Image (tube, rainbow, N blue to C red):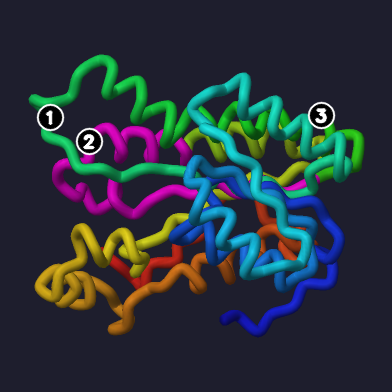
Amino acid sequence: MTDAVYPSLAGRTVVITGGGSGIGEVMVEGFDRQKSRVYFLDVATSESQALVTRLGNGTRFVQCDVTDTAALQKAIADIEAQAGPVSVLVNNAANDDRHRVEAVTPAYWEQRIAVNLKHQFFATQAVVPGMKKAGGGSIINLGSVSWHAAIPDLVVYETAKAGIEGMTRSLARDLGEANIRVNCVVPGAIRTPRQMKLWHTPEEEAKILAQQCLKARVDPIHVTAMVLFLASDDARMCTAHNYWVDGGYR
């Protein structure tokens, strides 16, 4: 658990996509501890409802498939109708299923881009008018170390994640005059239940540690600590950049 407290986050409306499990779940918990008004979007109903029950502090779950752009933007509009302009948007939802080049179909390509890149832009588009009226805001996009490291069997996912970094720079330039900050957090090999179940075998874990400068696994709370800082007024002059949380992975 991070010990940092950011008074500027108290009472602010925060939207997190993919907040029902993994890194997103820990970010929801982190903003809840900051006394933010947290709304998180996810398709996983049972996991998300369990998180809301566990927190019990007014954090709200909105069932939404972020690949449905109309539903995504309506969900954000409904949140703003209840809680006012979104102060912080965390574009976290993603899916890193492995795939071989020869197996990728046009339909698979479109779906992977939708779940890993497209929704980040359209969620941003939805919150911008409210942020402008409120005098500013913070948008945090989740990238990935995977394309920098050229991890195999992830070409469509890595294409999307590379695009997020370019999109972040462009949005920061276009929105900066409205005092809207846009940053990208780049997680390394994060120890989530999904990763540990599917891919992070003891052999893979040893390889990860060998590739990191710091010889300890990176957990979702470490990513959350960076996201909380970038969301807060303490980061008021931070925009248009990537912030790595990877233990020095190469």
Would you place residue 141 above or below residue 66 in this image? below
Q: Can the viewer see residue 249 in this picture? A: yes
Q: What's the mark number on residue 155?
A: 2
Question: In screen coordinates, is 5 left or right of 154?
Answer: right
Quarter of the rendering containing residue 169: top right
Where does residue 187 sit, x and y in percent of width and height?
41, 60
Question: What amino acid is at disc 2?
Answer: Val
Q: Nearer the viewer, residue 104 or 161?
A: 104
Label 2 close to label 3 by CB (< 8 Å): no
Query: Do the residues under discs 2 and 1 have CB atoms within 8 angstroms?
Result: yes
Closer to the chain start, of discs 2 and 3, is 3
Look at the picture and state if 247 lies above or below 75: below
Q: What residue would you read off at disc 3?
A: 129
* Total marks in image: 3
Is residue 25 depicted above or below 81 in this figure? below
Q: Which mark is residue 101?
A: 1
Q: Quadrant of residue 103?
A: top left
**Residues rendered magenta in the picture:** 137-165
Image location of residue 10, percent across then percent down? 84, 66
Q: Residues within 10 Å of mark 2 (few under 14, many from 20)?
A: some
